[in-house]
Amino acid sequence: QVQLVESGGGLVQAGGSLRLSCAASGSSFMLNDMGWYRRAPGKQRELAATISKVGSTNYAESVKGRFTISRDNAQNAVYLQMNSLKPEDTAVYYCNADATTYQGDYIMRGTYWGQGTQVTVSS
């Protein structure tokens, strides 16, 4: 199993910045693609940004040019730098990881989610 714990959310004024962090822990695992998703009030969860193990990135159109995703493979961590925040960025942000786990003779691959961190942008 892989546990993901997010941190860094909070309240910020429009135009401000926040940096989200997500740390993965567990035993005998390897992280593949990682990402950040978000769920705004009354809306479905949507992709914000993803990053592959070798650093290829993908962004939602709504965050391109403002958000930057990065990862530290040695620390099993992924980050989301959010600049020029807008009220419409208000959401719960979830860390996501595709991971391979090794349990004895078994190799399994699954998707894991953090519990989310609230980001609120005031106008």
Image (tube, helix red, strand yellow):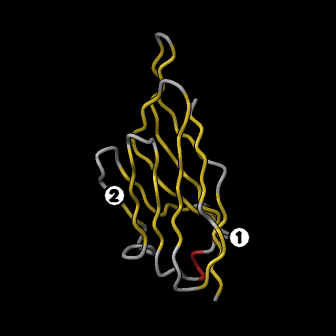
**Percent coordinates x, y for residue 64 in the rendering:** 38, 73
Residue reaching furthest top?
Answer: 105
Q: Relative to residue 21, is residue 5 depicted above or below?
A: above
Secondary structure under tag 2 reads: strand
**Percent coordinates x, y for residue 106 in the rendering:** 48, 15
Q: Going 51% across and 65% down the picture, which residue do you hit?
A: 19
- Horizontal arrangement in the rendering, residue 71 relative to residue 90 (left or right): left
- Horizontal arrangement in the rendering, residue 19 relative to residue 121 (left or right): left
Mark earlier in primary sequence (2, 1):
1
Q: Relative to residue 25, is residue 78 depicted above or below?
A: below
Q: Going 47% across and 20% down the picture, which residue do you hit?
A: 102
**Percent coordinates x, y for residue 10 in the rendering:** 65, 69
Q: Could you tell me which quadrant the N terminus lies in?
A: top right
Residue for badge 1: 42
Q: Nearer the viewer, residue 94 or 71?
A: 71
Residue reaching furthest bottom?
Answer: 123
- Kind of residue indicated by mark 2: Thr
Q: Relative to residue 2, is residue 10 depicted above or below?
A: below
Secondary structure under tag 1 reads: loop
**Percent coordinates x, y for residue 116 in the rendering:** 64, 55
Quadrant for residue 107, please give it: top left
User: Label 2 to label 1, Cα distance in Å?
Assistant: 27 Å
Residue reaching furthest front?
Answer: 75
- Kind of residue indicated by mark 1: Gly
Residue for badge 2: 57
- Horizontal arrangement in the rendering, residue 7 relative to residue 32 (left or right): right
Q: Nearer the viewer, residue 101 or 84?
A: 84
